[in-house]
Image (tube, helix red, strand yellow):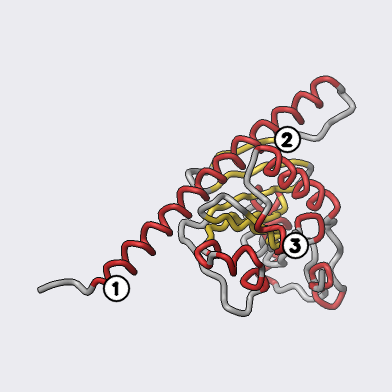
């Protein structure tokens, strides 16, 4: 019995490509981890140098594929997905010259950036909501682009020139901190919280089954930007 030559090429070429993408993404994630850790130390030094700065910054490593930064009642959670993804034909990135020149460049790993309220974790409010504020796509050439909200958004056309470097990663983390700081907790509409069950009242206030989120009951940043 012999293997079909086209099948062999397909399996080995695709497998090799995905392995390259995975390694490029893990390298990028390590750079995100190291950069965020170093920035946390710098913020802590600012607090020590000026007693008026009372905001605590903490860095927590949660394993190979997760870490977090805590500050001012917020958590920025960075998570790397272990799989490699391809974009649909209709995605805007597939129309860029960079991808048309070599379609293999469209295979990417992804790093998610979430924002949670620190109290949601502290008080184990499992019904509370976190928000994906950005996701960073990285290909085998260590080029990247970001899908995200406002400060984190980036044009797809930059994919061909934007590369993962210490400087670019620091800029992304800084924009994530900026966005989180400006993304305020708004009170939900009255009608959505006016009813409380007896069971909920028997629990402590912070453990009630009334979910808390920065835009609970509102459209998230109008979901148009």
Decide if residue 210 is on the left or right side of residue 138. Answer: right
Residue 201 vs 43, above or below: the answer is: below
Dividing the picture into quadrants, the one containing residue 194 is bottom right
Q: Earlier in the sequence, mark 1 or mark 3?
A: 1
Measured Cα–Cα span from mark 1 to mark 2: 54 Å
Crowding at mark 2 (Cα within 10 Å: few <14, some 14-19, many 20+) = many
Q: Which mark is residue 155?
A: 3
Is disc 1 in contact with disc 3, using a CB cutoff of under 8 Å? no
**Nearer mark to the viewer, of 1 and 3:** 1
Name, please, the residue furthest toward the front: 101
- Depth order, front residue of 122/92: 92
Q: Mark 1 sits on what residue?
A: 6
* Residue at image point 9% right, 74% down: 1
Q: Mark 2 sits on what residue?
A: 57
- Depth order, front residue of 43/91: 91
Name, please, the residue furthest toward the top: 49
Crowding at mark 1 (Cα within 10 Å: few <14, some 14-19, many 20+) = few
Quadrant in which the C terminus appears: bottom right
Is disc 2 in contact with disc 3, using a CB cutoff of under 8 Å? no
Residue 15 screen position, x and y as percent? 36, 61
Dividing the picture into quadrants, the one containing residue 145 is bottom right
- Depth order, front residue of 146/49: 146
* Residue at image point 53% right, 57% down: 109
Residue 83 screen position, x and y as percent? 46, 60
Element assignment for label 2: strand
Decide if residue 25 is on the left or right side of residue 125. Answer: left
């Amino acid at each position: 019995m012999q293997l079909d030559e086209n099948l062999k090429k397909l399996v080995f070429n695709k497998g090799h490509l995905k392995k390259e993408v995975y390694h490029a993404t893990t390298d990028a994630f390590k750079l995100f981890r190291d950069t965020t850790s170093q920035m946390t130390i710098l913020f802590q030094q600012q607090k020590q140098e000026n007693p008026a700065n009372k905001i605590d910054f903490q860095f927590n490593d949660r394993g190979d594929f997760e870490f977090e930064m805590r500050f001012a009642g917020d958590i920025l959670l960075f998570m790397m997905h272990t799989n490699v993804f391809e974009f649909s034909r209709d995605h805007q990135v597939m129309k860029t010259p960079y991808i048309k020149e070599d379609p293999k460049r469209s295979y990417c790993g992804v790093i998610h950036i979430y924002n949670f309220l620190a109290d949601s974790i502290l008080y184990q409010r499992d019904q509370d909501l976190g928000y994906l504020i950005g996701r960073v796509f990285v290909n085998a050439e260590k080029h990247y682009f970001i899908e995200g909200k406002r400060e984190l958004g980036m044009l797809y056309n930059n994919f061909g020139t934007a590369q993962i470097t210490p400087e670019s990663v620091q800029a992304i983390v800084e924009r994530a901190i900026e966005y989180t700081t400006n993304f305020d907790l708004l009170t939900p509409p009255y009608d959505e919280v006016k009813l409380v069950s007896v069971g909920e009242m028997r629990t402590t206030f912070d453990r009630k089954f009334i979910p808390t989120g920065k835009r609970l009951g509102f459209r998230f940043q109008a979901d148009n930007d």
